[in-house]
Amino acid sequence: MRKIGRFLCCTLIVLTFVNTSFAQGMKDPTHWTYESKKIANNVYELHFKLKLDEGFHIWAINVGGDGFQIVPKFYFDKTPKAKWMGNIKEKGKLMSENMEGIEGKVNYYSREVSYTQIVQAPAGSIIKGKHEYQVCNDFMCLPPTDKPFTFQLN
């Protein structure tokens, strides 16, 4: 009986490391582009555009479900004279369904989604920060990722 317990324990440890190292060795399935668009005098839209490889999805900001999913978050460095107007908005084809292992319906985007933040700042300002997110496919979720971004307001 002790041998079976040790075997199961060792097997679980090995499987955990194999799954983690496999996920870390995968090609990044996300393709981000960043652009700013002037919409009024000293008012800009910051656009974060994401294209995902086939089979991957990213959770919606309002994910639903049991609350254990890692949703996209955007962090902006302090920028002199910059004023953030409203919250970040997402746009894409929202999918909503029940998924195995998750309690309640979850919301997510496949293929592509864009996020927009409006900022009031002087022309020539540089807006920097990072965003955090997690992408998943039908078999696993990749470890959460942080990516830096930079916008030049022209």
Image (cartoon, rainbow, N blue to C red):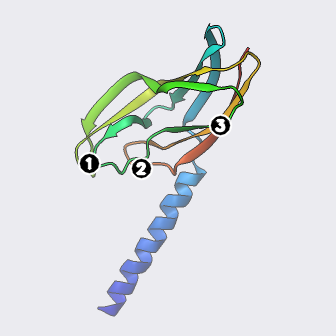
- Residue 31 position within the rendered picture, expressed as x and y whole percent measured from the top left: 59, 30
Distance (Cα) linking label 3 and label 2: 28 Å
Label 3: which secondary element: strand
Where the C terminus falls, by quadrant?
top right
Which residue matches tag 2?
A: 140
- Residue 6 position within the rendered picture, expressed as x and y whole percent measured from the top left: 39, 85
Residue 33, quarter of picture: top right
In the depicted view, which residue is nearer to us: 20 or 150? Answer: 150
Q: Which mark is residue 100?
A: 1
Q: Which mark is residue 129?
A: 3
Q: Amino acid at mark 3?
A: Gly
In the depicted view, which residue is nearer to us: 10 or 96? Answer: 96
Distance (Cα) linking label 3 and label 1: 34 Å
Q: Residue at x 33, y 48 (%)?
A: 67
Q: Residue at x 62, y 39 (%)?
A: 130
Q: Amino acid at mark 2?
A: Met
Label 2: which secondary element: loop
Residue 29 drawn above or below residue 116: below
Q: How many discs mark residues in the rendered view?
A: 3
- Residue 108 position within the rendered picture, expressed as x and y whole percent measured from the top left: 37, 34
Sort mark 3 into few (<14), some (14-19) or many (20+) by Cα contacts within 10 Å: some
Q: Which is more N-terminal, label 1 or label 3?
A: 1
Would you say 110 lies left or right of 80 here? left
| Residue 122 appears in the picture as rendered | yes
Distance (Cα) linking label 1 and label 2: 12 Å
Residue 87 drawn above or below residue 25: above
Foreground mark, 3 or 1? 3
Label 1: which secondary element: loop
